[in-house]
Image: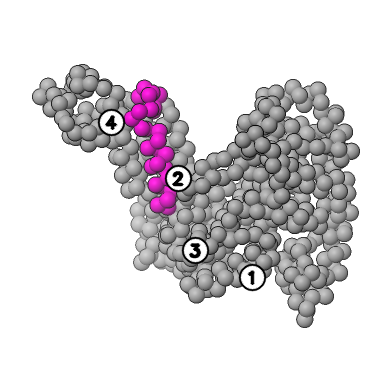
Amino acid sequence: MQKTVKYPESPRDPILWGEGDMGSPVVRGGDVYPKPNGRVSLQWLTACEEERALTTDLMDEIADLSNLVTAMRQVVRNGGSAGIDGETVAQLKEWFSHNWLGLQSSLLEGSYLPQGVRGVRIPKPKGGYRQLGIPTVKDRLVQQAISQVLSKRYEPIFSEHSYGFRSGRNAHQALQKAGGYVAEGYKYVVDLDLEKFFDKVNHDRLLWILGTRIGDKRVLSLVGRFLRSGIMQDGLMSQRLQGTPQGSPLSPLLSNIVLDELDKELETRGHRFVRYADDAIILVGSEEAAKRVQRSITNYIENRMALKVNQEKSRICKPRELNFLGHSILNDGGLGISRESLLRFKAKLRRITRRNKGVSLEQLIQGLNPVLRGWLNYFRYARMKKALVRLEAWLRRRIRCFRLKQCKRTFGIVRFLRSRGLPEQRVWLIALSGKGWYRLANSPGANEAMNLEWFNETGLFSLSSSYCLTFKETAPYVTRMRGGVRGRKGQNCLFCFALIPYSIDDLYWSHKPQLLKLEDQIDDQTIIGIRPASFSFSGSALRL
């Protein structure tokens, strides 16, 4: 059984106090980074040496056949495009079955040479491009094998405030955490934006951080080769001197390793924060505190971590004005949908439903439904009933416009409206109208012909009805309200302010001590919020 090294867990741990200036801590919050002046403690060096001694044969674990098979299956499951060699994911399984022994040998000998990545530019919503790098399927297999092994060692030491690219953690949990901080009274947000983070990571510093815990030089050398592998763009290969290519299986883990230093620093300072990948927000109680924290953390990121903070996108704002993972946060800790997310979604629907698309109505609906369903699934916890009603009305008008345009001529419009049961006079009134297609789609006759029943017949996914159904299927939960407590759907739990819905059984077993006090005084119907409760909330207990 492998020995594990325990790193200090808190700033008060005796291991933190050693050879720093005036007795100041040289290792903060369990991280392994020296002081800015380069001085480190003897305890820190000893911990690093012990950790490296345990990982001198890490490549043997990476090159193990079972680990390689698991990595190969994951790459096939993820799919994706081919790299610069043109080999697809479908060909990987056959190649691996014939060449796994050679791959294993090259990894153990330290002779594996990765190929360059294929550069792809993806347009950003606010302009510009995001540079992606697509490795070959063989390189993806090796990177996945490395990521699986390193994740086991780094996952236990990562911050609990980090939610991006981690197993068992997701964006909804990050939003729940941020909503909890707002409910506690932290009403100002420092929204940090790292400028081109994945393109700005310093290779030497990243390898140094890895070298503090990894003693197998073969692993460090291979990771370095992946970082420095060239990128092919427009038929030209260029050398990459910094950054980790977005699109590779190893980049998410490396980004978390780099930003874990920031997490540890924020924990040491006692800040309430949430980080998802390179998006980080810090919640404070006042505007002055927010300005002070922004200056201090920006200075730390740029001078200590050698990264760049985007001053134009970083800001101080109220939770309602936030655009964190597409959501805003309401004053009671609940979630709303940000204006930017709604506008971006409307732009996407506008592209899908453009009138010159050249597809049938059935094909349009088939392409539209998965987009609507996926979007609603992501924003299912946001309070956006009114926004959904307006969005659906606009979308139905777009589809009416699309259908009328398909008729092409006057007689085509007449035949379609006749089939919908409109009176002859109204049919010709619409068909001979000089209005544009979009205005015509909102006329009373068009609305009557293409009503809600007609949209149900087309099979269009309903956002508003599915949104309500979501909260009917997931039981309502109790919320804290101004002036007392009432049961409300789609809001926060009374006891823990969780954003996820609770069934009555889950609520009971999660908060059994609090509910036992009320067992003889209120019934289940009151607890799940079917009717208002006549009690108030104070601290962590309910009082009649």
The disc at residue 380 is 2
Q: Quadrant of residue 94?
A: top right
CA–CA distance in space, label 1 to label 2: 34 Å
The answer to the question of whether label 4 and label 3 lie on touching residues, with beta carbons closer than 8 A, is no
Image spot of residue 64 (x, y percent): 83, 36
How far, Cα to Cα, is label 4 from label 3? 41 Å
Packing grade of label 3 (10 A; few <14, some 14-19, many >=20) is some
Q: Residues within 10 Å of mark 1 (few under 14, many from 20)?
A: few
- Crowding at dot 2, Cα within 10 Å, few <14 / some 14-19 / many 20+, comes out as many
**Amino acid type indicated by mark 2:** Arg
- The stretch of residues the image draws in magenta is 338-365
Residue that carries the numbered disc 3 in the rendered image: 315
- Front in this rendered view, residue 79 or 174: 79
Quick one: label 4 or label 1, which is nearer the N terminus?
A: 1
Q: Nearer the viewer, mark 4 or mark 3?
A: 3
Given the image, on which type of amino acid does mark 1 rest? Arg
* Residue 255 locus on image (x, y percent): 67, 51
Picture disc at residue 148: none
What is the quadrant of residue 45 in the picture? bottom right
Outermost residue on the left side: it is 425
Task: Find the distance from the CA under tag 3 to the CA under tag 1.
Answer: 20 Å
